[in-house]
Image (cartoon, coloured by chain):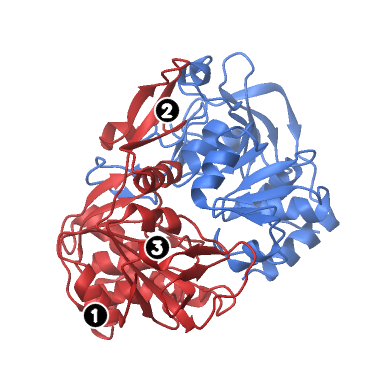
Chain colours: A red, B blue
Amino acid sequence: MAELVDLATGIKRLVRDGDTVALEGFTHLIPVAAGHEIIRQGRRDLTLARMTPDIIYDQMIGAGCARRLVFAWGGNPGVGSLHRLRDAVERGWPHRLELEEHSHAGMANRYAAGASGLPFGVLRGYAGTDLPKHTPGIRPISCPFTGEVLTAVPALNPDVTVIHAQRADRRGNVQLWGITGVQKEAVLAARKSLVTVEEIVDELGQKPGAIVLPSWIITAVARVPGGARPSYAQDYYDRDNAFYRAWNAISRDRNAFNDWLQHL
Amino acid sequence: MRFTAEEMMTITAARALAGHGSCFVGIGLPSTAANLARRLHNPDLILIYESGAIGAKPTRLPLSIGDSELATTADTVVSVPEVFNYWLQPGRIDVGFLSAAQVDRFGNLNTTVIGGDYQMPVVRLPGAGGAPEIAASCREVILVIRQSKRAFVERLDFLTSVGYGEGPGDRRRLGLRGKGPVMLITDLGVLEPDPASCELTLTKVHPGVDAAAVRQATGWELKMAETLATTKEPTDDELAALRELINHEH
């Protein structure tokens, strides 16, 4: 059964230096507060996995938490670049960042394979692109039935997956709805998982299209209202598009970023 | 009404969606064009966003592919593995809209790195996202890219998404099941693949654009159709609908 913890305790117990950590949430329900707690606790040498690094990984990379990034699309959605990510790759600041680069379809299938207990996922993807030259885990595989050549990608099994959800009940059953991205797969693929939630309720109500993650597959649940800001939590608060735009100027400049970091 | 080159490009992209059933929509200009098409001439166009929103009907332009407006107006919202595996991969989607930092004469795209080497590029771009599989599996692909020598290059710094590879037969050899890029819309005109060579060829210029200027903004020896057509000027209705959309952006 999931243990109900506070955020600082959850991060302290679950996230260790050198871990492979996935903070998932596809634009919606990004576990930003948990990422900030990882920065505050000074975790280092993390392999950060995420389909879309978004500003939370920009912040964690700039703060020096990451040794390696596993990703598919590293931009500020609708705005432009993630400048801390770019500074790390282009100029090695605050230190070199190794990249393990995939497409969205590849990342999704890596998590799905991880959740399924399979060593790899298979898809029609990457053919003819330069990605397999740089990402060793993209390999051709022949269909045993038709002989068609497809692409295999290795399962992604994070040490810890962290997600944010709308609510949990007192036993730690978690419910999320709206755009649910790859969170279910990322939790099921992980050895340990932490879910931050907007609220803890007596009974989970009905919601169209909602996913319930049962308490017994989750390690810990922490109540963190507003824990996805400046991303959003459907039916709780909207995406803070103004902050996404403002982040461009903060992240572009090392001093402005350091100033932001001081106040975290 | 007077119009800008950017407006001409967006309206041309919206017009290209006439008669299509479904569109895999990326954020930015493709999203603007697809939503404009729904308002103008294709109200039943099914918009599919990679966040899993299928049949989204946003009343305002979203800033990201995962804005709540997309989920709350969609026919259904599916997971990210599902949108790629069940919806895109089998070839269910008519049109994919893509843009890029670099394009070559065969419509291959780079959204990964510019200059230097892969490990330490001069410019690190966002990367692949959904593009390689959109380029592979949508029945047709429409490219929308502002035309300049920097973007229209002889040789890509990185091949992120395949158009026609190195020419005829490459898509089949690679097992890519969609038709590939059928049109490249720019702020200067429209390029279409030559049926024999697959090479992108200038077939239309936008009103007031000189063909020589298009050649000047292309980093390879640009082929031109024997008779160049001119794109129809935006109508007042088209411009009014576009401006209303943009003014109500999130």
Where in the figure is residue B137, as x and y percent of width and height?
A: 56, 32
**In the picture shown, does residue A103 fall above or below A18?**
above
Quadrant including the C terminus of chain A: bottom left
Q: Depth check: give the residue in front, A207 or B194.
A: A207
Where in the figure is residue A53, as x and y percent of width and height?
A: 37, 59
- Chain label for disc 1: A
Query: Is there a contact, CB below 8 Å, between mark 2 and mark 1?
Result: no
Q: Say what amino acid the circle numbered 3 marks.
A: Asp
* Residue corresponding to mark 3: A54
Label 1, residues with CA under 10 Å away: few <14, some 14-19, many ≥20: few
Q: Depth check: give the residue in front, B213 or A235.
A: A235
* Residue lying at 59% horizontally and 28% vertically, measured from the top left: B178
* Residue lying at 51% horizontally and 27% vertically, measured from the top left: B105
Label 2, residues with CA under 10 Å away: few <14, some 14-19, many ≥20: many
* Residue corresponding to mark 1: A9
Q: Is residue B216 visible?
A: no
Where in the figure is residue B136, as x and y percent of width and height?
A: 52, 31
Quadrant including the N terminus of chain A: bottom left
Q: Residue furthest bottom?
A: A263
Where in the figure is residue B11, as x and y percent of width and height?
A: 72, 49
* Residue corresponding to mark 2: A127
Q: Say what amino acid the circle numbered 1 marks.
A: Thr
Q: Say what amino acid the circle numbered 2 marks.
A: Ala
